[in-house]
Every structure is written in structure tokens, then in C-alpha cells.
Image (tube, helix red, strand yellow):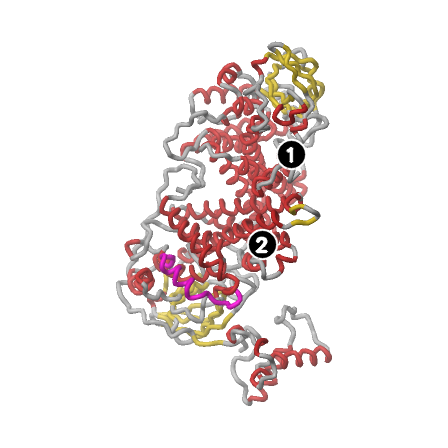
Amino acid sequence: MTGTTGRPLALGVTRSYSFVMSIMNSLRPGGRHGLSSKETRDPIGLAVAAVNRLAQSDLIDRVGLRRQTEQVVYSTTRNGFRVATAAGRTFARAGRRTAGERPAAAESRGLFDLTPTEDEQMLVDVVAELAAEVLRPVAAQADDACAAPAGVLQAAQEIGLTVLGVPESLGGIMEERSAMAGTLVAEALAQGDMGLAVATLAPGAVATAIGLWGTEAQQQTYLPAFTGGADGQDVPVAALTIAEPSVLFDPFALATTALRDGDGYVLDGVKSAVVRGAEAELFVVAAMLDGTPALFLVESGAEGLEVEADPSMGVRAAALSRLHLTGVRVGGDALLGDTDGTAYTECVRLSRLAWCALAVGTGQAVLDYVKDYVNEREAFGEPISHRQSVAFMVADIAIELQAMRLLTWKAASRAARGQDFAREVGLARQLCAEKGMKIGLDGVQLLGGHGFVKEHPVERWYRDLRAVGLMEGAVLV
Amino acid sequence: MINLETPKKQAGLVDQAHQLAMNMLRPISRKYDRAEHEYPKELDMLAALIDGVSETGATGGAGAGGVRRDARPKDDGGVRNGANLASVLSIAEMCWGDTALLLSMPRQGLGNSAIASVANEEQLERYKGTWAAMAITEPGTGSDSANITTTAVQDGDEYVINGEKIYVTSGDRADSVVVWATLDKELGRAAIKSFLVRKDNPGLKVERLEHKLGIRASDTAAITFTDCRVPAEDLLGSPEIDVKSGFAGAMATFDNTRPMVAGMAVGCARASLDLTRDLLEQAGVVIDYDRPALSQSAAAAKFLQLEADWEGAKLLMMQAAWMADNRKPNSLEASMAKAKAGRVGSDVTLSCVQLCGTLGYSEAELLEKWARDSKILDIFEGTQQIQQLIVARRLLGLTSSQLR
């Protein structure tokens, strides 16, 4: 068996054999470094590749051959370096395995309206301030470090982001279904930074899922840990994991499996886009059960879990990871929601909705930034905004951004009212993926060379916006 | 509370418009596309029907005249879903039936919207029941409408109008024309005023009708004005040349009519989407909103992209109309809606022809017609590029001399 990087997982009979195999495997071109499996290396190419391998080795670092500053800061960012998941807390079992509390659907008077409720507006105002004052200033640093600063996580917890989707009766903050509020919050947060927004929203995704689909026992067992956050307790780090590292990934045809085993289940597979995987104490894992996707609660202490850092193009502050599940046994009470795919399908849709909201917020950040830039930057003796080719790009960003926002809001408001929103979220995702990326692309283009360097945040937004349309899971409204 | 559905109280009206479009417009759609310049006599009965329904109040004020903004709105602090929203929604339904026939509806001309937008109360009463076309464009002046050369010179209690107008929608069939003319070319856009000219005025002459790519059921006229005398009280709005407010008076019409043209594009494009989806499904193509588009057939993925763009156009249209209903300034949003709907209208209708191959290209179906009809919607009432200029100037805080 080989890992995702092509390196053997088990050590060979002898170390030298293992080492040679490892080098040979790593020199096979296909599937690594962006090379197709059709590529072949000639002898000179092999020699060059071997020298390059040596140049990358830890060995020369240990003997001090390389300047310290050249070292990769985070060893966990190295391919294939895996650790066991965090030891985590013990969630004391409580409650009965009957249906849990469910948030009520929001009521509407049937008027077309684009005005948030007073409660939603208050929430958005607070979150917008957090985004501008706390997230944005540390965004570049968090992107670089592949980690969210403790202060950001703490602030998000204090304003109750984790329990936004949890009904009041279970210690949460909303009286009604919160998909609309969650969407507005995700949008406002992402205006600060998408990576940090994902890092701060991830535990809430798990809490919301338990609120929506959990049994009474699951709600009693897990939610108190989340709702204690407002009182200064440490909210558990938690991750909703749906995505898998495969081409043309389809969340309704997962490679991860759950096999029935006595009263419980055995899970096998690899999940990707796992937010803060190394620290997470609780996972919601999507796996195929009898050919239908289902959700399972997996505590980080379970045997057979390994986490691997998976730094990606963007959304880096969320410390994206891969979660390897090898014969992970969970109890019968680990199943979250039903086995006919209903809860799972809703989960996929609500997660996509959250990603749409993140795209809208990030798109707004791009628009606000380029507006100022093109008015200030001069070329040929006048601001570049005086040129139609520049101004029209800005106009199109604004037009498509507003269309993205309205589609996202429509899907969210339908979800909040308990109406079917399959079509609306499907279309919102389609538009946000396509136009969101275009906004990122044009944002960099409008700044020219300045857009390409990290002195400006636009290149980060470009990387972050590529996530929309391919991400599944991680966040949820 | 955020809600982007068709309002409950307007759902009935939209259904009615849909039934009218399906049962009265579609059956004669191809007929009048082929018989360009022939008067669609069936519309007289339809217009009478609509007038009748309007008088009962059941249309919620929808129609060309529905864009009027009351001087003193009833402000109960609540959200209004009024005539603007009702108008764009019902226009979209009618254009799902046939865009050219909607444009040919008696007493529903763009001139009627202009009257509703800028006329005073006395004029509004006096012009009741007229069918007014709109005459802005000239042979040498299209998008730069501040540059018009048609003049209006005061002579006692009359104005004397001289000039040539082209592309006057319903210019032949309407019984009056709203004409843009300048009182003083030196004073620029502030001096541009609109006048209502009766078609029986001896100084007005319909010179010819255009032969067009699409909307062929709608007559498009070239009209000359030669020493055309109109009473001073037929100058719409204020005769004062207010250099400060500039173009605002005349341009206010556009804030109201652009969402309507967006509605036309939304309706026309949906006709293409509805039929194409049906044809694709009959051919075994499954369109799934949950599965990733890239894992579905290329046709399904294309359809999803078109539908998403279309939904964006529709919601931008509804936003612009909703803002007008709630007395919020909406120039920016009206132009955004027009820009998005205009380009989406073309993309959707042309792509649907492509998806359906020679079946779509053939006159045996209406897909090719919709792909011809849609093009004008990205041109009249301000081209795509003019909308982008307006959006960009507003966003960037630039004047028309800075961003030209």
C-alpha cells in the first residue's frame, strides 16, 4: 500500500531496500510535481531528479549545510508527514437516542425584500467589525503560517460564531433556523479573510450539523462543549469532512466507506480539506454506508485516525489537512442523521451555501480594494480608472458580485424557511465558482505587477477564490 | 426579512400574464415574425382585456405606466412590493410569450413609461389612454443622447420642433410620440426636454419602417419633424433649464425603463431555457443541481451555467424594481440589471440554439427567433457599454468628463 504521495507506508525488510524503493518511487514522474503519468525520464533526467531529492533532504539540514532561513517553517507541511490526531477531550455520553431538538423554520410575510432582520443586521455589524479589525490585519501572516492566531479564534468564539446554528433551546443563540444569518455572517467574515473565516466557522459547522440532525443523545453529549464557549470555556476544535483528494470528486459517490460491524461501524478512507485537522477533537466524516452517503461523528481519540497537513493554494489560514481513516471503529450512536441520504444531501447543500457566502465576501473585498487602487494609480498622466478597459472590468466585478450575492441570499432564505433549495444552491454555486474566480483573476490583473506580489492582498484573494466550486464540507450555514 | 421569491400578492398576476403569453402570443408569434410590418390585430382584443383587468385594480398597477413614483409615498416604514415589481415580472412573462408582441401592445409603449416618469398630474390625466412611442435616437446620435440635434424653439404658446428621429419603437402604430429635443444646444443636456406630439400633427411624418434582425412584429419607424408645432403644455415636466439638475429629468425615465428591458431579456431567455431543457430531457440529458456540473454531460453543465447566469439577471431585475417601489435611488442597480440581463439574454438564447443544433436553428422551432429577438435588448434603452459606463462612474465616483 502506498500513501497519496507514492511513498511506501510500511518500512521494507531492510532500511536500505526501503530507502532505494522510496527514492525510486519518488523518481517515478507520474502524479507528482504536476507531471502526468505519461511522462518518462531519461538517464540525465533521473540524475537531475536524484540530485534535486538530495537537495530537498532533511539530512543536509541536520548537519547544518543549509542556512536556517531556508528551512521550511512548518515540518508538518512536508508531504507524507503524518501524526495521530489530537488526544482530545472525552465527551461524556448523555441523553437518549431519540430525535433531537430542531430549530423552527423562519416565517415570511411573502414580500420580496432584501433587508436583513434587525437581529441579522446587528450580528452582521459585529462580525463586520471583527473582520475589519481582527481578521484583515493578520490575514497575510496567517496565510503564511498556515494557522489562525489564537486571538482570532478566541474573538470568534466570544461573539458566539460557534453556536450560531444551534437552537436557543440547546444553548445556542438563534430562535429560528439560521441559514440566512449564517450566510450573512460568512459573507461579512470573508470580507476580512476567507482562510480565517473558514478557520473560525469550522467548529460551528459541526455544532450546526448536530443541531440539525443529531439525536437527543448526540446533542446532549456534544453540544454543551460548544455552547460553553460564550462563558470562556474552550470550544472544541471540530471539522466537517466531506471532500476527498480525487479528480472529479463527487460528494454523492464517496470512496470512504462505512461497514456495519455489530452494533457499530468501521470507517476506511481519506478525507481532505479538513480544517485544523491536527488539533481537531471531533470530526463529522462522510462515508458510503450500503451505497448511500451518510455522516458519522468520530472523536479524535479513535484508533486508526491519522492526520496529514495538506497546505493548499489558498484558504491556508484554515490549516487544511487530510484525515486518514484506517479501520476506525465507531459505535452505533455515531451515525449522524439518517441512512437514506436526506440529511447528507442537505448537509452538502448547506455547506455549498456557506462557500458561496465566503465567495461573495471575498469578492466584495476585491471590489473595494480595486476601486481605490484604480482611482489612485496613475498611468499616462491620469488615474487608470479613467480608461474604459479598466473601469469596465470594475463595473463587471460589481455586477457579477451582486448577482452572486442575490443567488446566494435566495438559496439561504429558502433554506431558512424550510423550503426546497436544491436548485437555488446549485445555481448559486455555479455562479459563485465561475464569477468568483473571474473576480479574483481580474482583481490581480487590475493591479498589474502589484497584484502579483504579496505587498497587496489581491493575490491571496485570487488563491482563496479558487476554492469555491471545488470545496465540499468544512463550513455550513 | 430577506426573501427573493415572487411576492405572494403578485403571483396571481404573473400566472395570468403567463396564460396570456402562452395562449394569445405564442400562437401568433411565428406568423408576425414572418409578416413584418403587418399589424397584429389580435393585440387589440388583448389590450382591451388588459385595460379591463387594470381598471379592476387586479394588475397592481403593472404596465408601462406602472413606473410612476408618487410624490408623497405612503410611508408606513414597511416594505413595498408595488407596480414596478409587478411590471417587470409581468413583462418578463409576456416576453416569454413574444418580445416583439409585448413591444407592440397598444397603450404600453416606452413613451407611456416616459409620461409616467416625468409628466405632471395635469398632463397625466390629459394623456390618459394614449399609446405613446419614444423618439430619442437620431441618425447621427445613438448612445450619446445628450448630443441630439432635434430642436424645439418657443414661439408664443407653442414650441416648433425640427429634426429627424430613427428607431422609434411602435412609431407607426402609436397615436403619439414622446420626442426628445433641445431648447438650446449651447446649454447642453440641461436644455433637453421631452414633448408629446400627436401623430396627426401635420408637422410629423413617418418616413419608413425598418427591416430588422429580430422583434420583427414590432414596427420600428423613422420619423421627421418639420416645423412641427406643439402646444407649450405638451412639454413634459418643467420647462425651466436647470443646469444643476442637468439631464436628471429626462434620464429619470431610464431608471424606470431599464429594469423593464431587463425584464424583456429575462423573459425571452427563459423561453429558450424552458424549451431547451425539455428537448434535452427528451433526448435523455439529465440536469442535476446536486451533482458537480463537471461530472454531468457537457450539455447539462452548459445548461447549468446558462441557468445560473439567467437567475442572476432575474434577481438583479427584481432588485432594481424593488428599490423603485421603495423610493430608493436605483440608477446603479437599474443599469446593473440591464447590463447583466442584456448579455445573458444573448448568451442564453444563442447557446440554446447551439445546444439544439439544426433543430434550434430551424424556423420549425422558435429558438432561432428568440436568439434574434434578444439582441436588441442589449442595445436599446442604453447599450451594454453605456450601462457599464454608468455602473463604473457610479462605483468609482467619476464624472462623464473623467470617464468618457
Above or below residue B202? Residue A84 is below
Q: Which mark is residue A200?
A: none
State whether the magenta stretch is mostly helix, strand or loop. Answer: helix
Residue A152 part of the magenta segment:
yes
- Disc 2 to disc 1, how far (Cα)? 29 Å
Secondary structure type for disc 1: loop
Q: For the residue labelled by badge 2, is the local secondary structure a helix, a strand or a loop? A: helix
Quadrant location, the C terminus of chain A: bottom left
Camera-nearest residue between A59 and A375: A375
Quadrant position of residue A300:
bottom left
Q: Nearer the viewer, residue A96 or A189?
A: A189
Q: In this rendering, is residue A371 above or below B259?
A: below
Position of B48 relative to A372 (above/below): above
The reply to whether residue A260 is visible in this rendering is no
The residue labelled by disc 1 is: B379
Residue A14 appears at what percent x and percent y?
55, 90
Marker count (numbered)? 2
Q: Position of residue A246 (x, y in %)?
A: 55, 65
Q: Is residue A341 above or below residue B238?
A: below
Q: Position of residue A171 (x, y in %)?
A: 29, 57
Q: Quadrant of residue A186?
A: bottom left
Dot 2: few (<14), some (14–19), or many (≥20) neighbours within 10 Å? many
Q: Amino acid at mark 1?
A: Ile
Position of B301 compared to A238: left or right? right
Task: Provide the chain ID for the residue under circle 2.
Answer: A
The residue singled out by tag 2 in the image is: A440
Amino acid type indicated by mark 2: Gly
Tell which of B377 and B234 is nearer to you.
B234
Say which chain tag 1 marks.
B
Q: At 46% across and 28% down in the image, what residue appears?
A: B83
- Kindly indicate whether the residues beneath marks 2 and 1 are on one polypeptide chain: no
